[in-house]
Amino acid sequence: MKDLMIDVENVTFRYDRREQTDALSSVSFKAEKGKWLSVIGNNGAGKSTLAALLIGLIQPSQGTIRINGVALDEESKWTIRRSAGIVFQNPDNQFIGATVQDDVAFGLENLNVPADQMRLRVTEALETVGMLNYRTADPTQLSGGQKQRVAIAGVLALRPDLLILDEAFVMLDPRSRRELLATLKRLKTERDLTILSITHDMNEAAASDRILVLKQGHVARSDTPAHIFSEETELAAPFSERLRRLLLKKGRRAPESYRTESEMVQWLCD
Amino acid sequence: MAMRLRLDHVTADYQIGPVRSPRVLREVSMSLQPGTFTAVVGPTGAGKSSLLKVLNGLLLPQSGQAEIGDITIDGKSSKRLLKAVRKRVGLVFQFPESQLFAETVEQDISFGPLNFGAHPRNVHALAEKVIAQVGLDESILYRSPFSLSGGQKRRVAIAGVLALEPEVLALDEPTAGLDPTGKEELLSLLKQWNKQNGLTILMVTHDMESVARYADDVVVMEKGRAVFHDSMRKLFEDTERLEKWQLDVPDARRFQLEFEVRSGTRLPRVCLTEDELADALIEVGRV
Amino acid sequence: MNKLILGRYFPGDSLIHRLDPRAKLISGIAFIFISFLAKNSQGLFLLWLFTFFVMSTTRVGFRAFFRGVRPLIWLILFTVFLQILFTAGGTIYFNWGPIKISEYGLANALFIFSRFVTIIVVTTAVTLTTKPMELTDGLTFLMRPLRILRVPVDELSMMLSIALRFIPNLLDEMQRIMDAQKARGAVFGEGSLFHQMKALVPIFLPLFSSSLNRGEELANVMDVRGYRSELPRSSFRRLIWKIKDTVCMLVILLLIAAFAVLNLI
Ligand SMILES: Nc1ncnc2c1ncn2[C@@H]1O[C@H](COP(=O)(O)OP(=O)(O)OP(=O)(O)O)[C@@H](O)[C@H]1O
Ligand SMILES: Nc1ncnc2c1ncn2[C@@H]1O[C@H](COP(=O)(O)OP(=O)(O)OP(=O)(O)O)[C@@H](O)[C@H]1O
Ligand SMILES: [Mg+2]
Ligand SMILES: [Mg+2]
């Protein structure tokens, strides 16, 4: 088995002691290095809470979290954040720098990276997300999708091993979204980057290596897309699976289990 | 009832501090028939939100004019006139839950009607009516809007606009950030109001699935211009122009195009939903 | 709300735009002192001449400066009237109890008025042509000596730059919320004072809660991106002192010299 990037064991968290329910309760899962893990679940299922725990913004009341083999605590979180980054759900409140390039450089400044090296990395990161032309723009004046790209660049500039994305593509139009996903996939293989992506887009989830399904603070399921979409029929599904289910319902010939879109087309052609 | 919306060569920009922004709407002309469900699509920054603001009198045309039924707004319209327009065109902003402020949901919903001079005695019944319309339980009226889930807040905010009893409902990306179930529910509600009550709906969205399944007509915005306004099907049949405007196609259509290339078989028509696709595949005997 | 000009940056590429923020800050501060050197009519003339020179060099347009002065106009007029009414000396033109309009009073008022307006105009010229972050950089640099006194200069400058980021955000947010409530029929700036105050509740409550949220989220972002005030940080931006900055300082020195000469003769 490959090394583990994320190892969460029995984690429980509650925002307020007065509340009756835990935001997360007894959550356990693992993510191997260099894999893409999608986290799905309804509004309020605890996805953002999980992300905040993984980056050490909040501490679990029970259980342990290991990132790249290191147990996460108040001390180790600073070391872990040198190679792990997060893009938050709301792109409006994520900017510190007054220009795009200043903002991307913020994390590097904190690591005391020398100025000329910083320039190089900032340029590289902005190029990756296709925002190099906007490097002197004011981030608050950008459209939602552009803001999300800049936020992603800010993390990529750190050359992280772990990238956590909390619905980081919702503001992008579908085309830019696909382009950015492809770029991140490429980085994933080139740099052995691990990606944990929270999403409501089932097509995106279907294209990942594994899916974690959260339901009211519990892990309902953690498996490959193929298993999850074949077996969890009450879950919203990607297009190929919707078509397969429909064909079955109409009593027609259909593949016996989940197929990706490309496989489904192939199946129809045969 | 039948109130028509017409834009006549509307050009508009924003005042930012000491400077004016570049034009965000350029010579936009269009005419919306009452009772239609129209989607507004286009890349980010194309002026979709600004278009809605013009129809609601929040952004005044610099030149040209907007006709909302028998009211005409131009650059010099009075506050009173604009208020009358806002009663007719209900505008739901992006992430409308951020504008909730009152102690209870009922008070928040009543805010609009009271502003428009509704009698305090009648607003309770109105609040009960609209909260049911958005598919929420009456008991929610007495809770604080801040104690609700994201999806519930969104619905309450929409109820607050419905309470104005507008003839046109304009919504800016109403399903952004909702989970798949919440999204489906909200869209079906909109469709239902459109079909049963004849409410004219104008909805900005990036999601071509919702366009294909719910909209009658589509407006395509590009760099401040309305470059297309016709039936939804016409738009998706025109692969070339879709490409030019960098617009996506619905999942089913994308699947169909891929299938046609790889199998060499052409399906009898353009398919926009899985139902249409399944039927077409059955027709050509593939399944 | 959007008409507020103070602290706004006006994008441009004029000579003044391209000056180093340190040069502009020093010049701006120096000008405040210089304006007190104007003691006779030639001095007054020179003061205005320099001010007009600065205004036209920014290529921002006089209207923008006029807007900068407008919010303070009542304060200025009030001070001017006090000067006119309560300064005695020289020929007396009008006398009524304690109130005298005298030659000295009028002259004093004219000087005060000129000082006020030229200082506002010149400092506005600095803020209009300098990006907020450049201002912060310049200030940080100029405050460096205070480090010896254990003043946390870097943290102050971080706070300042974040505050500067926050203000336009807050104004935009306010505009958004106002629009949203207007769409629900709210009308602002009409009716009795009580009515107007009441109309603000639907703006300030959401604005307040969203600012709290924003503040918290911003703090979280700084935290996860590894900001720790106790550790040394490198800096992405660098200030480069150019020849034109030296020239700018020379111009200021020249101006001081000119006033010195005018006051001697
Ligand atoms: N700061 C907070 N204080 C108290 N409760 C909170 C806080 N943040 C979230 N919650 C609650 O914790 C639960 C999980 O919220 P979380 O934000 O993790 O959901 P999510 O899965 O990210 O939802 P969404 O898809 O809407 O983003 C919800 O019931 C929510 O109301
Ligand atoms: N309040 C404002 N002040 C100044 N400029 C604005 C304002 N709102 C929008 N703009 C500018 O107007 C243009 C059109 O913006 P608009 O919000 O209408 O686009 P949109 O099509 O809704 O984009 P998106 O899909 O990102 O929501 C953009 O260039 C934007 O920067
Ligand atoms: Mg979330
Ligand atoms: Mg918009």
Image (tube, rainbow, N blue to C red):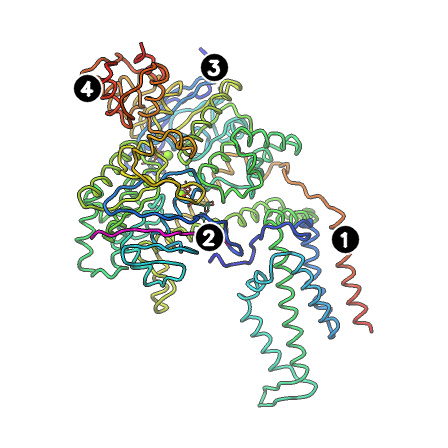
Q: Which residues are magenta?
A: B1-16
Choose between A62 and B60: the one closer to the eye: B60
Closest to the observer, A67 or A251 = A251
| Coordinates of residue B280 in the picture (x, y in percent) | 24, 21
User: Do the residues under discs 2 and 1 have CB atoms within 8 angstroms?
Assistant: no
Q: Is residue A27 above or below residue B199?
A: above
Mark 2 residue CB less than 8 A from any atom of ligand 2: yes
Residue topped by disc 4: A249
| Numbered label attached to residue B14 | 2
Report which residue position mark 3 lands on: A3
- Evaluate if marks 3 and 2 touch, with contact meaning CB atoms under 8 Å apart: no
Q: CA distance from mark 3 to mark 2?
A: 54 Å
How far is the residue under mark 4 from the one under mark 2? 53 Å
The residues bearing labels 3 and 1 have C-alpha atoms spaced at a distance of 62 Å
Question: What's under tag 1, amino acid-wise?
Answer: Val
Q: Position of residue B92 (x, y in %)?
A: 32, 47
Question: Percent from the top left, x then y, of residue C256?
Answer: 77, 63
